[in-house]
Image (spheres, rainbow, N blue to C red):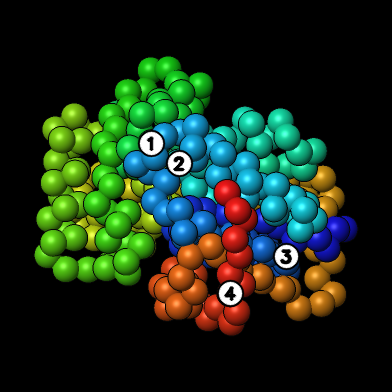
């Protein structure tokens, strides 16, 4: 048993969609969530810059004595997962391999599409993850930066959003994909709009559920679960505007966020 918290971070609020699944899977765990809202979005930035941000946040969370770290951001996973894993002697999970694993299990046609940030697409992290699982699967990628902006602003419905979704997906449908990976942790918030555009013909996969199962398996494997004797604590840090965290964050997490601590990592 180990009552230290789990650390979870994202560039913004999207990582709360992963946190929501982690809380469902391991409700007794203490959590520290970090949203780097001051430097959001990571997607258009150079991967080397995102790596620097991600390592600073991982250092911060490690110093908060976390027992396990989840990089709940595809762009940060794509740029920094191996570096962060090499840096600390605690289990570190990203969201790309779990999403690729679910998608590979779901495709019959062996043709998968992924929508993600430009950084994630250019890193080819999904291409590599899929190739490692099954090199006969073809992956088709589309950067969808506008959707990230809509979601972070809390715009989760409307004609403009739906048109943007369908415009991004059209070229992927032309490739006859039968599975679509939501390769950005913001996208589960507009999953229904995305499914509407897919019109039932394509299975939509998000990595949040698979990642949360991995979290549970690791806690069990290393015997580091919380003993569950006291009420679990959730602490939220962010680098940008706190009011947004309260309003948009609640919608993401599906439960009230009581307190957010503003922090400047001096990056
Ligand atoms: N949440 C980030 C991801 O999963 C995307 C947002 C951003 O561009 O910072 O890639």
Is residue 88 found left or right of 182 in the rendered image?
Answer: right
Which quadrant would residue 135 be assigned to in this image? top left
Report the front residue among 154 and 112: 154
Is residue 235 found left or right of 156 in the rendered image?
Answer: right
* Mark 2 vs 4, N-terminal side: 2
Which numbered disc, 3 or 1, marks the residue closer to the eye?
1
Dot 2 corresponds to which residue? 75
Tag 3–tag 1 contact (CB < 8 Å): no
* In the rendered image, the vertical position of residue 145 relative to residue 124, given as above or below: below
* In the rendered image, the vertical position of residue 7 relative to residue 54, given as above or below: below
Which numbered disc, 2 or 4, marks the residue closer to the eye?
4
Report the front residue among 235 and 216: 235
Tag 2–tag 1 contact (CB < 8 Å): yes
Which numbered disc, 3 or 4, marks the residue closer to the eye?
4
Q: Residue at x 49, y 32 (%)?
A: 48
Dot 3 corresponds to which residue? 29
Query: Of helix, strand and loop, which one carries label 1?
Result: helix
Q: Position of residue 167 (x, y in %)?
A: 13, 46
Query: Distance from label 3 to label 1 (Cα)?
Result: 31 Å
Tag 3–tag 4 contact (CB < 8 Å): no
Which quadrant would residue 33 be assigned to in this image? bottom right
Query: Distance from label 3 to label 4 (Cα)?
Result: 18 Å
Report the front residue among 111 and 71: 71
Which numbered disc, 2 or 3, marks the residue closer to the eye?
2
- Label 2 crowd (10 A; few <14 / some 14-19 / many >=20): many
Query: Distance from label 2 to label 1 (Cα)?
Result: 6 Å
Q: Residue at x 16, y 59 (%)?
A: 162
Q: Residue at x 73, y 66 (%)?
A: 30
Q: Can residue 102 be seen? A: no
Dot 4 corresponds to which residue? 260
Query: Distance from label 2 to label 3 (Cα)?
Result: 26 Å
Q: Is ligand 1 within 8 Å of the beta carbon of the residue shown at mark 1?
A: yes
């Amino acid at each position: 048993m180990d009552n230290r918290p789990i650390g979870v971070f994202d560039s913004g609020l999207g990582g709360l969609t992963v946190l929501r699944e982690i809380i469902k899977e391991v409700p007794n765990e203490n959590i520290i969530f970090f949203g780097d809202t001051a430097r959001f979005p990571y997607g258009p930035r150079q991967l080397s810059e995102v790596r620097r941000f991600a390592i600073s946040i991982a250092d911060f969370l490690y110093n908060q004595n976390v027992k396990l770290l989840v990089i709940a951001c595809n762009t940060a996973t794509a740029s920094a997962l191996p570096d962060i894993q090499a840096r600390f002697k605690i289990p570190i999970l990203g969201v790309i391999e779990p999403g690729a694993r679910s998608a590979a299990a779901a495709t019959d046609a062996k043709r998968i599409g992924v929508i993600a940030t430009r950084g994630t697409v250019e890193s080819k992290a999904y291409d590599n993850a899929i190739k490692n699982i099954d090199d006969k699967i073809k992956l088709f990628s589309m950067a969808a930066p506008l959707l990230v902006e809509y979601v972070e602003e809390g715009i989760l419905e409307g004609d403009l959003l739906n048109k943007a979704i369908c415009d991004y997906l059209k070229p992927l449908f032309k490739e006859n994909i039968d599975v679509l990976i939501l390769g950005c942790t913001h996208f589960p918030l507009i999953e229904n709009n995305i499914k509407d555009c897919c019109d039932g013909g394509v299975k939509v996969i998000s990595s949040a559920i698979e990642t949360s199962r991995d979290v549970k398996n690791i806690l069990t494997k290393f015997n580091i679960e919380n003993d569950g004797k006291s009420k679990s604590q959730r602490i939220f840090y962010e680098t940008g505007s706190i009011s947004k965290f309260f309003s948009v964050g609640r919608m993401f997490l599906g439960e009230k966020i009581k307190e957010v601590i503003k922090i400047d990592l001096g990056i």
